[in-house]
Image: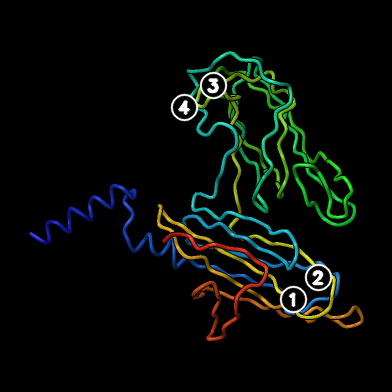
Amino acid sequence: MLSCRLINVRRYLQHVLGEKTVPEIRRAAFDFEHSFSCPQEVLVNETFKCSLAVRGANTVQATVQWEDRPPYNQEFAEANRVSLGVPSLRDYENVGSTCKLPAQLIYGPVTSHRAALHTVWFMSHNGSIRLTHRHLKCHTGYVSDYQKNRCSDGSGAQVVSLHTKDFISTRPGVARFEIDPGWDMLHGDVIEVTTGDTLKCVNTGAPKLEAAIQLDFSNENDVEFAGAFVTEGTHFVIAVLESYAWEQLAPPKLIKLPIRVIPLHMKAAAVLNSTESPIFTTGGQLSRGGTDLGRIVGFRFSFLGG
């Protein structure tokens, strides 16, 4: 009787979790592979890169931060794809509606550190749309406010058009176009539809009709982040990996790498200071190889789950 009950419970869990077993879920949420590496030594004001790689996870929200700088955010997903606009636009191909849309529609800003636009789906009245990829650039400092287009030194960020393309379809219904190579998108970038008034609308159940467009992006599993330190001494680059797999939440993994920042007259050693999984976290601290790296000062995070 007990074995029958266990079999029924297992079948129920597989149904609810999409045929995923408990070990598979645990491996994707808790035991996924990851590595984070930075140079061990750099010069003052030298821009250097840190590399983060994630493998075998279902979904990981990563936050990487240089001390006293705005954090970078990146999502690592098993499907490795996200969409803006109407997800699964083809499901609404036969329920198009008439509405009046503005000529300019903005999709974004991109919240990942890096992504690539690779597929465009749309329905329009005349079979064509124009997309423009816009990027914010600061001559000095960095973009500190993407909503107000402001730089860290208080100046206004320059809006740069990196890509512009017309997409023309001769077939009725939903048109699909691949972009090869994809448009590389950085954090804060937007896609502007400069012919939004030619798009049809669809009723997705939302309070308002939505423009009939779907933009598919792919995220990388290996991502580089760049930053610099302006003062000498030992500073830290921090990474927080918040993982969940099929509704199973895991405590965050914290990684704190020390960087020695030396004067300009000294030569930085090209030695990588890296950490690779497994990483053990307890009570908001990172312990690696038996060394307690302590609590992260000035960095806010919260544990997921109970």
The furthest residue to the left: 1
Amino acid, disc 4: Asp
> Label 1 vs label 4: CA separation?
51 Å
Amino acid, disc 1: His
The furthest residue to the right: 265
- 142 vs 82, left or right, is right
Question: Do labels 3 and 2 touch, CB within 8 Å?
Answer: no
Does any portion of residue 299 appear in the rendered image?
Answer: yes
Label whose residue precedes the other's in the sequence (3 or 2) = 3
The residue under label 2 is 229
Q: Which element is circle 2 on?
A: loop
Question: Do labels 2 and 1 touch, CB within 8 Å?
Answer: yes
Above or below residue 113? Residue 105 is: above
Residue under the image location 49 percent in, 24 percent down: 92
Question: Residue 62 placed where, x, y %?
Answer: 59, 59
Question: Do labels 3 and 1 touch, CB within 8 Å?
Answer: no
Question: Do labels 3 and 4 touch, CB within 8 Å?
Answer: no
Amino acid, disc 3: Val
